[in-house]
Image: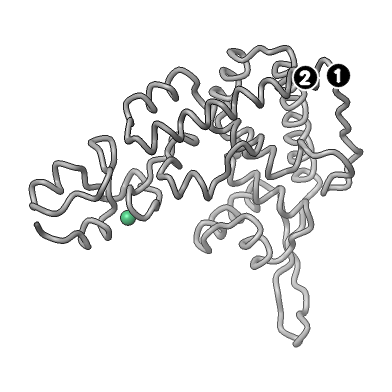
Amino acid sequence: MELDTKDLKVLGAVKKGLTTFGGIKNGVNLKKDELVKILDILDESDLIKSTTGTGLLGQKKLIIHLTDKGDQKIESYLEILRKKWREMLDLAIAGERDQLDQMIKDNPYMVNMMVFYKVTTTGTGLLGQKKLIIHLTDKGDQRIESYLEILRKKWREMLDLAIAGERDQLDQMIKDNPYMVNMMVFYKVTDLPTLSRLNLRFLLEGKHLCYKCKKELKGYMQKFSVSDVRKFRFKLPRGMTTRDDLCADCFNNLTKH
Ligand SMILES: [Zn+2]
C-alpha cells in the first residue's frame, strides 16, 4: 500500500528510537486521534508491532517497534530522499534553477521530509547511517553562494512588497518561481516564525491559513471572505484582501462598524 507523508513520518519516528505513544506524538507533532489512526494503518500493514512494557512506576505501557518489513520500507524511502537530495544539489550547483523549481513543485513535501530526516546534514545521521559528506569544489561553492545571494535578494523584494501591501505583485512573483519560498526556508534565508508573523505562511506548500490567527483552513472548515465581512458590516482586518479568508473564531470576534 502507498503510505502518505504523515505515515512515513511516524514510521521514521519509530526508526529514530521513539517507541512510546507519547514520544511519537511529540516527535511528529500529531493529534492523538490522528496518530491512533496512523498506527492502526501501520499495524495492519504489518510495518510495526507492539509489546507491553512496564513503566517506572510499574504501570503498563505500549512499546512500538518496527517489523523487518517496516524497517525495509523506511530504509528504501530514506534512500530515495538521499538520492533526490544529491540530484537537487547537482541542479543547484549547475545553476539549473528551472529544473530545481520543477523538481520541488513535483514533490512539494520532499524538502520538508529531508529536513525532518536530516538527510541534508553532514556527519553521522540520526539513524546511525553512514556519514553523507558533501564536498563542494570552489566553483560549486561559488554557484551555491550566488544562488543564495539571489534568494536573499528575492526575499528582500518580497518583504518590501508585503510591507507595501502589494499582494498582486507578490503573488505574481511566487507564480513565476513556485516553491522558491520552500528553498528560502530550506537554506535559512528566512524561517517559519517570520513567515507566520508576516502572514506569508501561505506561500509555503500553498497552505491556506486564517488571515488573523494563521490556523490552517482545512477543506471542511468554515471560511469567511472580505465579502462576508462587508455583508455583516464588520470592520475589515487591516491588510486583508479578497484572496484572504478568516476562520469562524476570528470572524465571530470582529467588531461592528
Ligand atoms: Zn483565525
Disc assigned to residue 138: 1
Q: Quadrant of residue 183?
A: top right
Quick check: 147 above or below 48?
A: above
Task: Give the alpha-carbon distance from disc 2 to disc 1, as whole Å.
Answer: 6 Å
Q: Nearer the viewer, residue 152 or 32?
A: 152
Type of the residue with mark 2: Gln
Ligand 1 located in image quadrant: bottom left
Residue ID at (46%, 35%) = 159
Q: Position of residue 16 (x, y in %)?
A: 78, 53
Quadrant the N terminus occupies: top right
Which residue lies under the disc numbered 2?
Answer: 142
Quick check: 109 above or below 153?
A: below
Outermost residue toward the bottom in this view = 57
Residue ID at (73%, 61%) = 64
Quick check: 21 above or below 123?
A: below
Q: Quadrant of residue 257?
A: bottom left
Side of 213 where 224 appears, left or right: left
Query: Do the residues bearing badges 2 and 1 touch, measured as CB atoms within 8 Å?
Result: yes
Side of 146 where 203 appears, left or right: left
Type of the residue with mark 1: Asp
Crowding near the residue tagged with mark 1, few <14, some 14–19, many ≥20 C-alpha atoms within 10 Å: few
Quick check: 194 above or below 134?
A: below
Disc assigned to residue 231: none
Q: Position of residue 17 (x, y in %)?
A: 79, 58
Residue ID at (45%, 42%) = 201
Counting the numbered discs, the total is 2
Outermost residue toward the right in this view = 130
